[in-house]
Image (cartoon, rainbow, N blue to C red):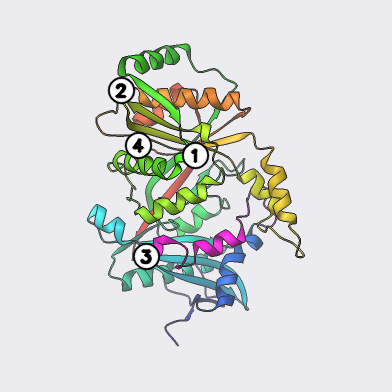
């Protein structure tokens, strides 16, 4: 049997029975199309799933357009039964992670599967074989393709749609992972915060004292100086998270590419820089939850040659009332001074003025107690849990 095709057979002690599922690497344009389109079929009847724009997914997987491929490698696989796609996965080699953490870890991502252990196990085994061939003794994920992009598996909080750039999946995924020998590596949390509930007066008083005592000036980013503002944010970003689990420094090309994509959806009033004596020391980025509009577009901007999806996207974007606070970072030497509370309060106040009802703060590490307590003090309620898994190969 060719190495490029794996026929699933019953293995003594394994959960899945023998099946007619085949796992093949993505090689042709048709394979890539099947890889991209499969989720649209899998989630067709799920009211909470938000279809990504198909053109964006194509660009994300295109080595000529996604700067992650300038250093990383990924092998895509498809699972088929009777010629029909029933699952997919990407095996990933991220050298920047291993260089940063001094580890030998392979990764996987973009996993989607029907509720069938034979399909899931076959995909996981295909990814594990590829990872092992790269010289890695374990694999971890899902990462698409690192923590700087969408990652993790939703395990709690299926009652509402995901916020922009957050994962979503069926409830049965956790069972597929654990049944295939995966164990928890780390949980990530999401919080909900309403702008209609005023922050505790004590927090407001303390934040104002901190602002005056530290000489903190909070301002919105200047769109007319966008390139330089991106550089300022980049400096803070790479300094602020270096001690956090899962952090991987972005290359300049990655950061600039992401900034260019985010520019289309940000509200400048909600991207904040905190300065002390003119030096940028912290920033926070909160964006409108564009998933509301993406869902209206249905994954495509045109239909029958007409810009129907684009029109739906535009009209829906005007009705967005929720936000996602994606990131808040503070440089070493300025932490534990309450600057985070100042930025939270500024964000809540501005969001309310702009007419937003509230939104999600995500994601935070389960063991980042300082940050989680700060969010809870502001009135945040934990609503979703996401999980990163690992296993030996």
The mark that comes first in sequence, 2 or 3, is 3
Which residue has dot 3 on it?
70
Q: Residues within 10 Å of mark 1 (few under 14, many from 20)?
A: few
Label 2: how many Cα within 10 Å (few below 14, some 14–19, many 20+): some
Where's residue 232, x and y in %? 36, 40
Q: Which residue is mark 1?
A: 223
Q: Which numbered disc, 3 or 4, marks the residue that appears first in the sequence?
A: 3
The residue that disc 2 covers is 337
Residue 55: in magenta span: yes
Q: Position of residue 134 (x, y in %)?
A: 31, 71
Nearest-to-viewer mark from 2 and 3: 3
- Front tag of 3 and 1: 1
Residue reaching furthest to the front: 224
Residue 219 x %, y %: 44, 28
Residue numbers of the magenta segment = 44-70
The answer to which of 183 and 191 lies nearer the viewer is 191
Q: Secondary structure at mark 1?
A: helix
Q: CA distance from mark 2 to mark 1?
A: 28 Å
Distance Cα–Cα, label 3 vs label 4: 32 Å
- Of residues 13 and 127, which is closer to you in this image? 127
- Residue under numbered circle 4: 367
């Amino acid at each position: 049997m060719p190495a490029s095709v794996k026929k699933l057979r019953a293995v003594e002690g394994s959960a899945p029975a023998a099946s007619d599922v085949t796992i093949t690497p993505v090689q042709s344009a048709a394979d890539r199309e099947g890889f991209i389109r499969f989720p649209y079929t899998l989630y067709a009847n799920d009211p909470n799933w938000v279809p990504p724009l198909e053109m964006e997914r194509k660009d994300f997987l295109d080595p000529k357009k996604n700067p992650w491929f300038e250093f990383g490698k990924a092998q895509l696989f498809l699972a088929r039964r009777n010629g029909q796609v029933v699952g997919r996965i990407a095996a990933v080699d991220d050298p920047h992670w291993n260089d940063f953490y001094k580890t030998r870890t392979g990764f996987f991502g973009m996993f989607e599967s029907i509720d069938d252990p034979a399909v899931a196990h076959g995909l996981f085994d295909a990814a594990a074989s590829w990872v092992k061939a790269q010289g890695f003794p374990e694999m971890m994920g899902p990462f698409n393709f690192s923590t700087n992009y969408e990652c993790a598996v939703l395990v709690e909080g299926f009652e509402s749609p995901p916020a922009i750039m957050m994962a979503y999946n069926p409830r049965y995924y956790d069972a597929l992972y654990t049944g295939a020998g995966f164990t928890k590596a780390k949980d990530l949390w999401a919080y909900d915060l309403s702008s209609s509930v005023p922050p505790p007066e004590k927090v407001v008083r303390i934040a104002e004292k901190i602002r005056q005592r530290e000489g903190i000036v909070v301002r919105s980013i200047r769109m007319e100086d966008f390139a330089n503002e991106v550089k300022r944010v980049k400096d803070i970003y790479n300094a602020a998270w270096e001690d956090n689990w899962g952090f991987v420094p972005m290359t300049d090309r990655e950061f600039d590419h992401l900034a260019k994509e985010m520019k289309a959806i940000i509200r400048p009033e909600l991207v904040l820089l905190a300065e002390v004596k003119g030096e940028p020391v912290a920033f926070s980025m909160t964006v409108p939850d564009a998933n509301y509009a993406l869902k209206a577009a249905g994954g495509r901007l045109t239909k029958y040659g007409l810009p129907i999806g684009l029109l739906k996207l535009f009209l829906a974007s005007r009705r967005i009332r929720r936000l996602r606070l994606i990131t808040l970072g503070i440089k070493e030497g300025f932490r534990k001074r309450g600057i985070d509370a100042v930025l939270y309060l500024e964000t809540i106040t501005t969001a309310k003025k702009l007419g937003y009802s509230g939104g999600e703060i995500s994601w935070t590490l389960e063991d980042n107690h300082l940050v989680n307590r700060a969010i809870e003090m502001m009135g945040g309620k934990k609503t979703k849990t996401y999980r990163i898994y690992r296993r030996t190969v």
